[in-house]
Amino acid sequence: MHDFNSTEGFMIKRNAHVRRNLLISALVSLVLGLGIGLLIGRFATCPEKSTSNVQGVFLPGVPDRIVQDGDPTIREAIINSIKPDNIRNFLRDLSEFPHLAGTAADYRQAKELHDFWTQEGLDEAFLTPYDVLLSYPNVTDDDMMNRIELLNETGGIVYQSPLREDKLYPTENKSDVVPPFNAYSAPGDVVSERLVYVNYGRVEDYHWLLNNTSINITGAIVIARYGKIFRGDKAHLASMYGAKGIIIYSDPADYTLDGSTARVYPEDWWLPPSGAQRGTIYRGFGDPLTPGYPSIDTSYRYAENSSEAELPNIPAHPVGYGIGQKLLAAMAGEEVPTDWRGSLNITYRLGGQLISTGWKIRMFISTQNAIRRTYNAFGIIRGAIEPDRYVLMGNHRDAWVFGAIDPSSGTATMKEVSRVMGNLVKQGRWRPRRTIIFCSWGAEEYGLVGSNEWVEQYVKNLASRTVAYVNLDIAVFGNYSFEASATPLMYKSLIDATKQVPNPDELDIQQGLHTVYDKWLKSFPGQDSSRPDIGTLGAGSDYAGFVQLAGIPCVSMDYSYDSNTYKIDFYPLYHTVYETFYAVDQLIDRGFKRHKAMAQTSAELMRNLADSLIIPFDVIDFANNLQTLVNTLDTDYGVLLRSKGIHFNWLQDAAANFSSEATTFKTLVENIDKNDPFAIRRINDQLMLMERAFLDPSGLPGRPRSRHMLFAESSVNSYAGSSFPGLVDSLFEIEDVPAAEADARWEIVKQHFSVLVFTINSAQSTLRQVSSFMPEFK
């Protein structure tokens, strides 16, 4: 007998189970069908993501822009957005008041830049403080101010130099104008019966005096004219040859039109009689008390009188040619050689005794050193793809007085570049591939202090991550043509940038010179005339620390006067109270057309370095430059070196092998798979780090903090660049020194020659295939 209710319940449950399974099967089929459809649709409609069409590494989820070059339309957007009126307004504000390093005005400008960068769309802004040793004259007590005096036989004052420069234009009538002084001069009240004229105060000038006259420099005060070499080297050499003080004056022959004083500031840009060139005489870089390390709270500081600080040990003072004429006219002695004569209306004499019996020369220098705080300011645009790769633009902010040319023409130009780039970022129209950092350095005028301290503090980061540094110390000091100095890797990108910027001179354009490059090439052609002359970097500005401590490719550029026509040492108003906004606005660059061209050129250079898929360096330029250095050394010293048993062919072979490796590497770059982001990164690292291979951790002979084996400042002129500086310094007048000294120097030459050959051979390995950097031994 069956239970009907149990069977019916079973059937109901069974049917429900079947329906549920059918429903689940339908849902699974629907999901699978939808997924398959999406996949088919994805690859049917988006074939560019198919691995079969990509030669290189396929990275799902990685955006295409990782292997894309920079947007070419951004170049025009940046260049066309540069406004000369903005630069003019920036410069007027920057140069309205004096802003000497370590003062309240210096901090105020740093903070204003910080706030400007934040306002204009940059991602971050920073201030970095350093407590450093600076130097200042007495400005509160006329009796204690620096001065030069001529004294008669009873000690009476026959002549006293004016304490301040003349006020020649209303804008100069401001408080806080520091009177002329040489920073880090030793203080002292120095009196001597002898005043000796030493021409430009170079080594060859002292040698001429010692070899051709009976003048005794020991215990004398010397007077030298500005020009040819760095003022700090003038003071150092004066001390070395026994002088107890040095007066440095600006001769009209070097700072006026054809030596004439008829047309000078404020009528024209030529130096007036009262204009005196301030400036440091410290020959080192960075804070004198913390050499090699940043001047931060934890730093050890040497005493000022220690040998490590290397501070000047005699009084020094700068004067204009109005004062210089009074002093030179009071000198007795033989007439100077023809090429030692300046353009003053006097008879130039070598001196020794003064013109009247019993007269004396007195230097009263009250300049004192003091630890003060200075600031660097930074504005940062983070890179979209390679934020850990930095492209830097910088110039210093501090000035001896108003600084409308040096440095504020550069600061105003950099502000406009940062404004344009920041606004593009803020608007969402652009973000560079690599990080861009705008840098405003403090206390450059005292010895590249702010930039050097920063490089010392962050050298580990900078040496491994920085692509290049673009220096705009003085953007415009003439209205003739663009010019530049650079390390060779920068040649290509620099030339490419100048070809993109219109020539600001309408008369030039009428003559077919349409771009900044066209005028540059015509004005300053290189040796083979196929490209413009590009100078060698010395140590005259903030690029020095980047080159010497971190091995970073650098360029320094400006708009210059016609040095082929005007045979002057530098722009005439340099470091005087007359470097005013008026001088720039009315005498040098009316309409700020050259400032605009400098902003456009530097902006395009920065964009190319920051945005290009492959860093725009050409290793062939470096190889060619190296070969030129070897040939020049052979011409100048080859016979002498070979006569001492030095295998000069080792250096020639090293340069030739480097050139061969560079050619192979360039072919590799040209054929790289641009769809392979790892290959691109590898090549870029080789390009970026090659310059570092020319650093030696021991530095140059006697100069441990100058580490670049190919490019450094001359040891007898810190302004000038010197190629193979370790060799050339050691060889300088080596045949004219005593035998014992010559023998010791020859050992230095031989040792350094070996290091140089090794460095070049070692640098070749950085260009080889990264897994095959060691050549097979045969």
Image (tube, rainbow, N blue to C red):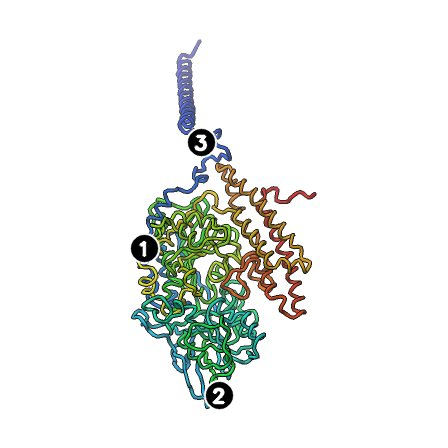
Percent position of residue 434, x then y: 44, 47
Which mark, by number, is residue 84? 1
Q: Would you call the spot at circle 1 few (<14 residues within 10 Å), some (14-19), or many (20 or more)?
A: some
What's the residue type where badge 2 is placed?
A: Thr
Q: Is residue 142 above or below residue 56?
A: below
Q: Is residue 465 above or below residue 565?
A: above
Q: Which residue is mark 2?
A: 357
Q: Quadrant of the C terminus?
A: top right
What's the residue type where badge 3 is placed?
A: Lys
Q: Residue furthest front?
A: 338
Label 1 – label 2 distance at C-alpha:
60 Å
Q: Is residue 377 visible?
A: yes
Earlier in the chain: of badge 3 and badge 2, it is 3
Which secondary structure lies at badge 3?
helix
Label 3 – label 2 distance at C-alpha:
95 Å
Q: Is residue 570 above or below residue 424?
A: below
Q: Residue furthest bottom?
A: 154
Q: Nearer the viewer, residue 124 or 480?
A: 480
Label 3 – label 1 distance at C-alpha:
46 Å
Q: Would you call the spot at circle 3 few (<14 residues within 10 Å), some (14-19), or many (20 or more)?
A: some
Q: Residue at x 63, y 56 (%)?
A: 755
* Residue 557 quadrant: bottom left
* Residue 300 quadrant: bottom right
Q: Nearer the viewer, residue 16 or 541?
A: 541
Q: Nearer the viewer, residue 66 or 352?
A: 352
Q: Which residue is mark 3?
A: 49
Which secondary structure lies at badge 2?
loop
Mark 3 vs mark 1: give the one in front: 1
Percent position of residue 124, x then y: 40, 53
Q: Quadrant of the N terminus?
A: top left
Q: Is residue 220 left or right of residue 81?
A: right
